[in-house]
Structures are given as C-alpha cells and as structure tokens.
Amino acid sequence: MESTQVKLRIVNPDKQIFNDETGQTVTGKDILKQLKINNVWRNDIKGKYIGIQFDAFEFVFREGETLTVPATIAKHLRRNSIICVGSDKLNGPLVPYIEVVETYEVSAPDAVKSAPTPTTCPICHEDQKTFPALTRHLGQEKKKHPELFQEEKGKTDWEGTGTDGADAE
Ligand SMILES: [Zn+2]
C-alpha cells in the first residue's frame, strides 16, 4: 500500500518558476491569467473550480484549497495540469498550474495505535497516563495475576541460594 501522500493546490500568484533554458521567469500570476484565457475554470454551486481528469475520475481544485492524494496520482495530476503560458504557443514555457504544497509519509493506522507510551501497562496494554497511576495499577495487576510477577522474584531467590558449586570446574 502506498504511504506517500502529496498535498496539492492551484499555483499561488506569488510563485516564481525560473526556466534554465530560456532564462525566463513565469510567475503564478502569469499562470492564473493563462488559465482564464484558456477557459479552464468551471462553475458549480460551491463556486469556481478546475477539474482534472485522471483514471476516469475528476479531481476538483478550488482557489485557496488543498487536495491530498497519493504520490502516483499527484504525479499524473501535475502532468495533466501543464499549460503553455504566454502568446507563443510553439515556444512558450510549459508549466503545471498545480503545485506541491508538501509531501509526507503516512504510517499504517495500526502501527500508530499499538505504539506504547511509557505509562502503558505491560500486562493489559492500557495507557495509565501518569507514572503514579501506573504504579497503583501495577499493584492491582500483581494481586490479580501474581504468576506474571513471579519470574523476577524467582530470579532473586535463585541468586541468593546459588552456592552449591556442584558444577564447578
Ligand atoms: Zn494493566
């Protein structure tokens, strides 16, 4: 299962994209202007949006809102958002109007849930929240399950009486 998530949004007007080959800088403002010229915006009851098709599904982007998707989908959506900015349709800079806000790893929910805290009871695995509460709780666990606390006691006794020397070399 994929665990890398990417937060996307429509390019910010302040964004600057520098092109090494042409030495030109395209700004977010230029890109937004081009989106208007290209008539990319649609309207629904919630206002204007841009829909990008991928895998028979339309991903909806709105101004000032982010959309979080798995990394592979993000890659395709950004590729599908590439437009030619400016009046030079043959040589104009090609830039995606969807930008990456952040990329992060998501761990499996089960792993998060089972991660014990220092105050988690090792017997019933319930978090006691504070150390005094854990100490009190362990006292009760000891009364309920004395067998679970015997190992340590037995070890201490064994050390105290380990003097018979029968296997000495
Ligand atoms: Zn417990």
Image (cartoon, rainbow, N blue to C red):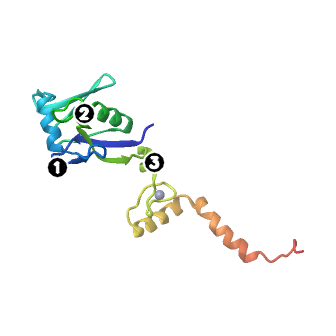
Q: Horizontal and vertical percent for residue 119?
A: 43, 63
Viewer-nearest of discs 3 and 1: 1
Residue at x 44% of width, y 67% of height: 136
Q: Tell which of 167 and 14 is nearer to you.
A: 14
The residue beneath circle 3 is: 111
Viewer-nearest of discs 2 and 3: 2
For badge 3, the amino acid type reads Ala
The residue beneath circle 1 is: 14
- Position of the C terminus by quadrant: bottom right
How busy is the neighbourhood of tag 2: few (under 14 within 10 Å), some, or many (20 plus)? few
For badge 2, the amino acid type reads Asn
Q: Horizontal and vertical percent for residue 18?
A: 26, 47
Q: Tell which of 36 and 146 is nearer to you.
A: 36
Q: Are marks 2 and 3 in contact (CB under 8 Å)?
A: no
**N-terminal-most mark, 2 or 1:** 1
Relative to 57, is 34 above or below?
below
- Position of the N terminus by quadrant: top left
How busy is the neighbourhood of tag 3: few (under 14 within 10 Å), some, or many (20 plus)? few
Query: What kind of element bears circle 1?
Result: loop
For badge 1, the amino acid type reads Asp
Q: Which mark is residue 49?
A: none
Q: Horizontal and vertical percent for residue 150?
A: 63, 64
Q: Horizontal and vertical percent for residue 88?
A: 19, 32
Label 3, label 1: how far apart the Cα atoms are: 39 Å
Q: Which mark is residue 91?
A: 2
Query: What kind of element bears circle 3?
Result: helix
Q: Is residue 94 left or right of residue 64?
A: right
Label 2, label 1: how far apart the Cα atoms are: 23 Å
